[in-house]
């Protein structure tokens, strides 16, 4: 049985009825906002490639965290942008580093806000790649202990969620084993299980100072042409102990989000990445798009594809985008 067209139009014309039968629910609680943390005091650095986004020093994070919490957003994801880098990534595990201090500052200010911590060495290594190098090649196995050290440091600082984004083989098992051995068996791991070698990361690499000094990341990030490989990567990470899996980017990979959501029984996270944000904002600044309506449609499409949680730079305006939700 189907509704006559006129009845369907009448249904859509009523806001309360439309909301009652809407198939896809999206609200601020489904969103997580990324924060970039820099050294210094009272540092507020606009990110040229990402209009409306900033790098902040630790002392300014409580204000940012309170704003995010008032938006109804469920959490903030931290990215450290250190001034000191090395060849081993050891600085990433410094308990007095940017991210541990940022975790403490946010939890002191807004204890209920979930703090997600990205785990990757790219911003901490001189060459900008996601793993330790040996003879100009990624040494996968030598990288795993560094990632585990970094994760343990963030756990001890009070992180609510550890999110490895490096795409090294076996890193979920290595991190899970280290956390379990140190008394953090209940700390969730969100694996960037299907992270594609994408052109949409450019603005982020400017924001985080993490562009590779040579070559690219195609040897450890996924080929955009591959879909079945994503399902294998997801299955492997779940078997190693991932509690949630993440697809990145989102818009060009909605089909991957859908396939993963249909296949796995853990929550699915999608990252609405910097390039997706920046191209919409650039179009809006030129008067080609309405930013709010386009952002709502973009985020709804990601949820409709099957994402339970969406990490997005639009989350800072969640209440304006989704009022009353």
Image (cartoon, helix red, strand yellow):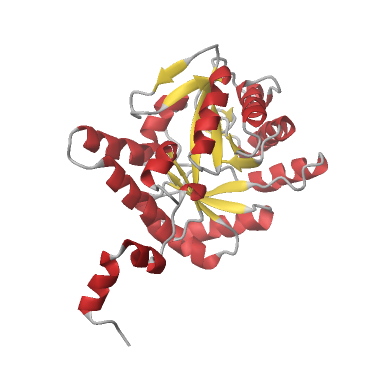
Residue 174 as seen in the image, left or right of residue 247: right
Locate residue 176, reporting x and y percent.
72, 46
Q: Outermost residue, bottom direction?
A: 1
Residue 48 seen in the current view: yes
Which residue occupies 82% across, 41% down? 183
Residue 129 seen in the current view: no
Which residue occupies 43% across, 56% down? 303
Q: Quadrant of residue 215?
A: top left
Residue 48 vs residue 216, the one in the foreground = 48
Residue 88 vs residue 180, the one in the foreground = 180
Which residue occupies 77% across, 42% down? 184
Which residue occupies 40% across, 28% down? 53
Residue 3 as seen in the image, left or right of residue 250: left
Callout count: 0
Question: Which part of the image, by quadrant, shows the N terminus?
Answer: bottom left
Locate residue 121, reporting x and y percent.
57, 30
Q: Quadrant of residue 175?
A: top right
Locate residue 274, reporting x and y percent.
39, 36
Residue 222 as seen in the image, left or right of residue 10: right
Vertical comparison of 173 with 68: above or below: below
Q: Outermost residue, top direction?
A: 41
Q: Quadrant of residue 239?
A: bottom right
Locate residue 128, reporting x and y percent.
49, 26
């Amino acid at each position: 049985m189907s509704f006559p067209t006129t009845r369907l139009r009448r249904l859509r014309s009523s806001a309360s009825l439309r909301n009652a039968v809407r198939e896809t629910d999206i609200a601020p609680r489904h969103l997580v906002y990324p924060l970039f943390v820099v050294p210094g005091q009272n540092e507020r650095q606009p990110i040229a490639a990402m209009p409306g986004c900033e790098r902040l020093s630790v002392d300014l994070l409580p204000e940012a965290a309170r704003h995010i919490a008032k938006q109804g957003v469920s959490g903030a994801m931290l990215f450290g942008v250190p001034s000191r880098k090395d060849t081993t990534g050891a600085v990433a595990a410094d308990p007095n580093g940017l991210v541990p201090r940022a975790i403490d500052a946010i939890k002191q200010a807004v204890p209920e806000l979930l703090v997600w911590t990205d785990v990757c060495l790219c911003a901490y290594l001189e060459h900008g790649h996601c793993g330790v190098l040996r003879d100009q090649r990624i040494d996968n196995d030598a990288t795993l202990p560094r990632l585990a050290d970094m994760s343990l440091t963030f756990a001890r600082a009070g992180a609510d969620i550890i999110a490895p984004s490096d795409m090294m083989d076996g890193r979920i098992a290595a991190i899970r084993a280290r956390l379990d051995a140190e008394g953090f068996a209940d700390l969730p791991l969100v694996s960037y299980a299907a992270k594609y070698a994408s052109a949409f990361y450019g603005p982020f690499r400017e924001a985080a100072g993490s562009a590779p000094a040579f070559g690219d990341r195609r040897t450890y990030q996924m080929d955009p042409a591959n879909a079945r490989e994503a399902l294998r990567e997801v299955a492997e990470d779940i078997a190693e102990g991932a509690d949630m899996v993440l697809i990145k980017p989102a818009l060009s990979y909605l089909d991957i989000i859908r396939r993963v959501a249909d296949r796995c029984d853990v929550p699915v996270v999608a990252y609405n990445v910097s390039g997706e944000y920046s191209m919409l904002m650039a179009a809006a600044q030129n008067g080609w798009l309405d930013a709010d309506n386009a952002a709502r449609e973009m985020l709804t499409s990601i949820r409709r594809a099957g994402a339970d949680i969406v990490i997005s730079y639009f989350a800072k305006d969640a209440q304006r985008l989704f009022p009353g939700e």
